[in-house]
Image (spheres, rainbow, N blue to C red):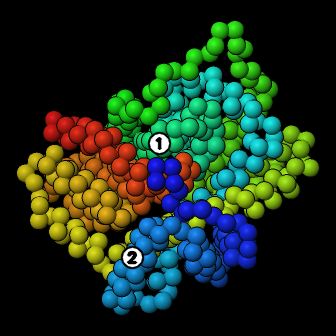
Amino acid sequence: MGNARIIGKTDNTGFLPGAKTVVLAALVAVSTAQFIFPAPFLNGAVNYITVAAVLISLPFTGRTSGVICLALFFSGAYLIYASGAGWQQMMEALGKNTGLIVLLLAVPLLGVPLKHGGYIGVLDALALKCMRRRYQMYLVPAIFSHVLGVFMNLGAVPLTHEVTARGRLAGYPGLLAKSLSRGFGAALFWSPNMVVTALVLSYLNVPWQDYVHLGLLFAGIALLTGFVADLFSREGREPEEGRASGSAEPYIDRVKLGQLAAAGVVFLLIVILIETATGLPVIRTVPVIALALPAAWLFLLGRKDLIRAGYEDYFRNRINKYDGEVVLFAAAGFFSGALALSGWSERLCAYVMLFQAHSKAGMALVLLGAIILASLAGIHPMVLVSAFGASLDPAALGFTPVQMALVLIAGWALGAAVSPMSGTNLVVAGLTGKTPLEVGCANLPHAALVLAAIILYLAKG
């Protein structure tokens, strides 16, 4: 199963695959309409279309993934029923991760100009030139996914994959999976655009400017330890493929490269301007931008005749390739919502307090261990992080609010790095052909190094 996707082989012919494409396209369209024209009936429609998308994608999901999803759905349904919540609450829980699903489905559209605008050759030449060495093959995608993730959130992962999965690196999906997940995960430690940072700081009433220096420090540590952990990997360590004597240097079209750089800057500026002006999260704005930007890009290139072909190719051949991810995202969100509705998050806080340690380092280990172990069990880090942030008093545990923020944010980041159910690993797995379990297990040494660094910092602090 080393290179097998979690969804198995997808047949795009027949009635059911065609209907699946229509449902997924409708989910993107209605979610976009709800974003532009907020209305209660559209919000309800999005939830029902999400249910339809899950049901129609389930037959195309692999057996293991399907069993996990069904277990999460049935467990969540029982918790909601036992809590006395009604149908409306159950539908809201089912739609909890719809934004993540729409983001996953829409972002591949950003690859349309790359294919139809004549940029594939430029990217291949750039990858051949800049990622010849083994360390470059790891560092380039990691740094790019980190920097882009600061502005784009999870949308940075597929976009980075689109740009860097070239040449020799394309033959090492495990290496690319580690680079993408660790580079993006480091941005969780400090970026104000990340949900975890905004959520934790708001719970603890910590101004971002008071926390950012510590977040940046551990983001740097996360990037460094990710590289150190990769030094022990054997993947891609056969003799380097040097350039043969007399062979030509890869030709890079500087005009096309400049256009790519300009498009990237414009895209980031649009994201930043929209978020600054509206305060809306990028997980909602990026899909809308992804729907519009390819058409504008091709139009400015004078390739308007290819706009229709690009979008048709996307809707026929790209939007319907994420069956396992669609089902798993919905199942994870549903189970997370069920835990919150049933009151189990508060109970978990009470259980953690039973293990209260006598030092900051010991208490941090308890909290981090609880979040990471729950993540490994399939519980989204958001559940425990939210419960701890809302219920625990930092002073009672010996923490300053800033230190408490670091512990909770790190718990989320490391839990997402190792969990087979995290949005990051689900996306990375779908892009690289690995399973979510393989991606999570590969990140265990990296997570252990970051965890040790946090414990040492608090032990001396």
Identity of the amino acid at label 1? Answer: Gly
Q: Image point 64% across, 43% down: which residue?
A: 162
x, y percent for residue 310: 81, 53
| Position of 176 relative to 88 (above/below) | above
Left or right of residue 248: residue 166: left
Left or right of residue 24: residue 397: left
Residue highlighted by disc 1: 174
Q: Which residue occupies the extreme left position in the image?
A: 358
- Locate the C terminus by quadrant: top left
Q: Image point 74% across, 21% down: which residue?
A: 251
Question: In this orientation, which residue lies closer to the viewer: 338 or 242?
Answer: 242
Mark-to-mark CA distance, 2 and 1: 28 Å
Question: In this orientation, which residue lies closer to the viewer: 40 or 99?
Answer: 99
Name which quarter of the figure residue 386 lies in.
bottom left
Q: Image point 36% across, 64% down: which residue?
A: 378
* Mark 2 crowd level (few <14, some 14–19, many ≥20, 10 Å Cα): some
x, y percent for residue 241: 56, 21
Q: Image point 11% across, 58% down: which residue?
A: 356
Question: In this orientation, which residue lies closer to the viewer: 111 or 441?
Answer: 441
| Position of 177 relative to 307 (above/below) | above
x, y percent for residue 284: 60, 60
Residue highlighted by disc 2: 71
Tell me the SS state at disc 2. helix
Identity of the amino acid at label 2? Answer: Ala
x, y percent for residue 264: 68, 38
